[in-house]
């Protein structure tokens, strides 16, 4: 068992351009305590300002991603206390992070854990992973995206079934439904996620940021408006040094060296 005096979130830099954030409450199946949420939020603020970081790997380890909120910290809370926690502000740096985020999911991604995974841009899941919004079974409902992001990911009928029954779905069903980007063997999840991060980190960061921004902004916009966003972002990138470098490298049949300029 991990020493409980260790930080609830561990930051490391496994490769150039890649930051790793590992949830570290194995004694509590990585339940999202207020302290863990705050620490995670602060890490995202710092990484978003770090020009050396081009991709973020978010993981809970090889056994569990995160098994929901910390129920012991919720049972006696009243509505005003919940309001004053302003979890939307805590989660905003994760939601609004301009850097691509890849989640490596093994084991449970339940409740807040599922909602946290859905804030990533790419989800790599092991075949033994499962996803669930079980809040209804304890008399509440999802409060940080488990109804709104879920319906956008898997559609009305699957989201309704998950939120109304609290029943978990397998990683395979999540993949079929569009909640998971890639499915692999449990022991390969971290390596596959890191490979995705490595590839993204080699891409021009300005282009990666624009791709992420336009996809997210365009999801809920009319198609014509979303297409206008796409055109403008593409036009802006032609002012970057990386655009010139990428095209020149292609012509010269060499690997480009992107600087984020």
Image (cartoon, helix red, strand yellow):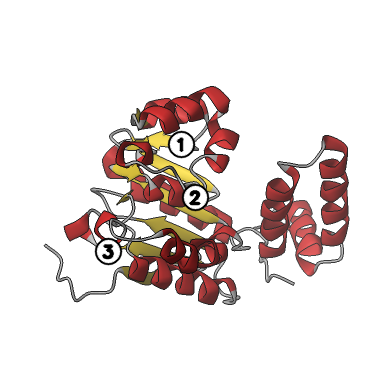
71 and 170: which is toward the camera: 71
225 and 144: which is toward the camera: 144
214 and 153: which is toward the camera: 153
Name which of mark 1 and mark 3 comes first in the sequence.
3
The residue under label 1 is: 182
Compared to residue 26, the image places residue 150 above or below, namely above
Residue drawn at (21%, 57%) of the image? 28
43 and 70: which is toward the camera: 70
| Residue 169 position by quadrant | top left
Instruction: Determine the CA span between mark 1 and mark 3.
Output: 24 Å
- Left or right, 106 with reference to 21: left
Compared to residue 36, the image places residue 248 above or below, namely above
Q: Identify the secondary structure beneath mark 1.
A: strand
Name which of mark 3 and mark 2 comes first in the sequence.
3
Q: Identify the secondary structure beneath mark 3.
A: loop
- Whether tag 2 and tag 1 are in contact, CB under 8 A, the answer is yes
The residue under label 3 is: 24
The location of residue 66, given as percent across then percent down, is 32, 51
Task: Say which of marks 2 and 1 sits in front.
Answer: 1
Instruction: Determine the CA span between mark 2 and mark 1.
Output: 10 Å
Residue density around tag 2, few if under 14, some if 14–19, many if 20 or more, within 10 Å: some
- Left or right, 252 with reference to 181: right
Residue density around tag 1, few if under 14, some if 14–19, many if 20 or more, within 10 Å: many
Compared to residue 154, the image places residue 43 above or below, namely below
The answer to whether any part of residue 14 appears in the image is no
- Whether tag 3 and tag 2 are in contact, CB under 8 A, the answer is no
Residue drawn at (50%, 30%) of the image? 159
The residue under label 2 is: 196
- Left or right, 4 with reference to 146: left
The location of residue 14, given as percent across then percent down, is 39, 66
């Amino acid at each position: 068992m991990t020493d409980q005096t260790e930080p609830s979130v561990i930051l490391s830099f496994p490769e150039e351009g890649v930051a790793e954030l590992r949830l570290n409450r194995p004694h509590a199946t990585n339940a999202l305590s207020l302290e863990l949420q705050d620490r995670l939020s602060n890490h995202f603020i710092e990484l978003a300002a770090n020009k050396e970081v081009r991709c973020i790997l978010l993981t809970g380890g090889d056994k569990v991603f995160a098994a929901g909120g910390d129920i012991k910290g919720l049972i006696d809370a009243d509505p005003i206390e919940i309001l004053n926690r302003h979890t939307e502000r805590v989660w905003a740096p994760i939601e609004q992070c301009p850097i691509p985020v890849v989640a490596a999911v093994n084991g449970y991604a339940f409740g807040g854990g599922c909602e946290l995974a859905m804030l990533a841009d790419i989800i790599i899941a092991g075949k033994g992973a499962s996803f669930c919004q079980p809040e209804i079974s304890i008399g509440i409902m999802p409060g940080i995206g488990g109804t709104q992001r879920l319906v956008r990911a898997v559609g009305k009928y699957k989201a309704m079934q998950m939120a109304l029954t609290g029943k978990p779905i397998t990683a395979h069903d999540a993949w079929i439904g569009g909640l998971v980007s890639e499915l692999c063997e449990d022991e390969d999840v971290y390596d596959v996620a890191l490979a995705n991060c490595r590839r993204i980190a080699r891409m021009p960061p300005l282009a990666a940021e624009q791709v992420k921004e336009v996809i997210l902004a365009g999801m809920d916009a009319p198609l014509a408006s979303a297409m206008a966003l796409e055109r403008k972002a593409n036009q802006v990138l032609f002012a970057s040094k990386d655009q010139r470098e990428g095209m020149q490298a292609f012509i010269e049949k060499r690997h480009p060296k992107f600087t984020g300029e």
